[in-house]
Image (cartoon, rainbow, N blue to C red):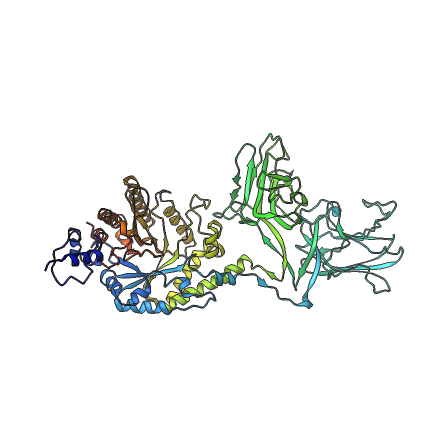
Amino acid sequence: MKYTKNILGTMLLTAVVTASCVDDKPLAFEVEKPASIAGMEYLNDYDVLKNYVSSSANPDFKLGIALAASDYIAGGQVTQLANSNFVEMTAGNAMKYASCVNDAGEMNFDAVENFVTAAKAGGLTIYGHTLAWHSQQRPKYLNSLIKDKEIEIDPDAANNFIKYICGEAGVNSWDKQATYVLPKALEQGVEYTFKVDIKASEAFEGLEFWPIWEASPNKNEWGGSNDVQYLGAKGAIGTDWATYEWKFTSNFPLDKLQIVFGKFGGTVCFDNLALVKDGTEDNLITNGDFSEESTEGWGNNWNGPSFEIGMEGAGPAIYYVDQVNNGKMEIGQPMDNFIVRESGKGDVPGVILEGQGPDGINCISITSISGAVNTHDTQFFIVTDKVWEAGEQYRISFWYKATAEAPCETQCHVTPGAYIHWAMLPQNPNFTTEWQHYEATGIIPADVAGKGMRTIAFNLNADKENGHTYYFADIHWETVEKGNTIPLTPEEKKEVLTAAMNNWIEGMMKATDGYVTTWDVVNEAISGGGDDGEGFYTLQSASNASADDAKNNFYWQDYLGNEDYVRIVVAAARKYYAENGGTAPLKLFINDYNLESDWDDNKKVRSLVHWIKKWEADNVTKIDGIGTQMHVSCYANEATQKSKEEHVVKMFEILAESGKLVKISELDMGYVDENGNSVKTENMTEAQHKAMAEYYKFIVKKYFEIIPAAQQYGITQWCITDAPSDSGWRGGEPVGLWDSNYSRKHTYAGFADGLAGK
């Protein structure tokens, strides 16, 4: 029969120029066809895609399709296309964390179990996507696991005390003193007993008790006996509370207590002070147990340590939050908090010396210039993201030494070089050739008010004539916080999140019951920016994400660690797969995008291979393969398209050299015109469709040509049909091998020809 005008009009409305017959449903009658439809007729001669896989491919090669699990389970035309053309499926979202876990942390794997059942019935394997990812997580639930923990309040256990933070050890016993002004002077010639509980951050000897007559008209506090009683030391001071006692007769109307410990460089704590006249019970020290959280009457000497109320047991507690990232100076972690400036040169991070710090930890070195004009011609800066306020309390600690003895100055800066104030630390460190530990609490100077201070500057050219090398290690600059909750330590966060990750993976492995033998074990780990210290990209992190991404995603690696993150997930996958019916070899892939990118000359794929070597360096972790997503576009601009193709080839070469299995895990394609604009399906020309077909053929052919057969895991087409205009993925673009009416497109032929090696 012939078309009538009306019938022809109807057919042209329902079939775009790219349309051909739907697989397995040929027309039941003959017609005269318009030229545009006749031009598609050749597609009817193509077999189903899986029959085109090259005979030289790995016999285990998997041709896959990505589908919504619900679409496949529905058993309609999508199911027919999948079963007839492919051997493996990837669920678009159904097997991701946010699809199975709710905001309360409750897991539901019903959709996964139904998907597995349907795949078994259809004879398709499943590629698991994905076990670990920063996106499509449940930040509300996961952040609740690592929120500040409540401090158990036991009023009977509450204990306040006063602590003195010495910083650098002094040369003389009197260099560090805790002083207390008595409300009333002692009676001359009367016997007294002084008791105090003391503990220290580390054991030391040399603490003495020197009560003094501060109001003496002939005061001689530097020696002699006109106004001071030197009552001597009491042996070693330990790290646990112990009671020390002095009995003495007051030789003067003593009005001030002095406890001296100048040769100690740690923290000394005092509690339960009692000074009692013999024969009485009245304590002459006010608030000796510090129950009022007051330091009234307490002080230090001219060279003295800072002091504050400490607390044990009941809250509100005092705790510290470190504002310095990577204070341990770990290789591969950002060094943005540590900056070196030499006169006439640009700012650079400090040089990490691996294992050369105290007790084998890492440190950094800074070498001062010779012939300096100013003490600040060489500077070392500790920088935080936090803006410090005037009067804010802080605690700082670090190890330090130099190649020669040298003093240094410390200043307040906004950012490195933006000077605010001449004095920062309560006591400047004096460098020696041996490692020393510095610890002090202090108050941000009033002069920085409103100026945005973020930086401590160490001026390292006190010796202007000679250059020396200075070393710093284990740097921490902390805010002093107070409350009835306390942040989990990094170790505690890692522990609770490791348990959560294990729980999730165990649940997924139970739901899949050993049927899913290949997984994206970690998805999109590489950031595509930054420098890990070895010339490669860093991992994804909240610190290098946009504000919205940092809020809406959950970066497991920020808590589990750059290397342990992948190791923990791999170990859990292998353990729970074996425990839940898994008998076939388990293959675990790292999946990522932009590996074929030309704008960075394939740096991302090189970085991924580099990180896989780091993850496997423990000789336990084994990663079987690499998935390259390849959400590409075909470009009308010939030079651009040529560059894209060259870097696809480079990517395959790098992946082949890795020795890992290689999967094109998420292949789809759009079209970009000469003006750099993505073309929507409705505006595509036949020539553009054919150009896309050629690019599909190029990609698939190069995969088989470059990837050794033993490394060829498979290729998965990410979009079975063109995307609807309202799709969340490449909306309105011609990304499918079939059109929206499930008819083959020119790209179907290009894909098939690539598989066949034409």
337 lies left or right of 407? left
The quadrant in which the N terminus is found is bottom left
643 lies left or right of 10? right
From the top left corner, tell me how far across and down residue 3 is, in percent: 13, 58
Residue lying farthest front?
A: 6
76 and 6: which is toward the camera: 6
From the top left corner, tell me how far across and down residue 100 is, in percent: 40, 65
From the top left corner, tell me how far across and down residue 158 is, in percent: 68, 64
- Rendered position, 627 above or below 637: below
408 and 149: which is toward the camera: 149
Q: Look at the image and tell me whether residue 651 can be seen.
A: yes
Q: Look at the image and tell me whether residue 20 can be seen.
A: no
441 lies left or right of 546? right
Residue lying farthest right?
A: 189
746 and 162: which is toward the camera: 746
- Rendered position, 346 above or below 183: above
Q: Residue at x 61, y 48 (%)?
A: 388
**Picture mark count:** 0
Residue lying farthest left?
A: 1
From the top left corner, tell me how far across and down residue 155 is, in percent: 68, 67
Q: Residue at x 20, y 60 (%)?
A: 22
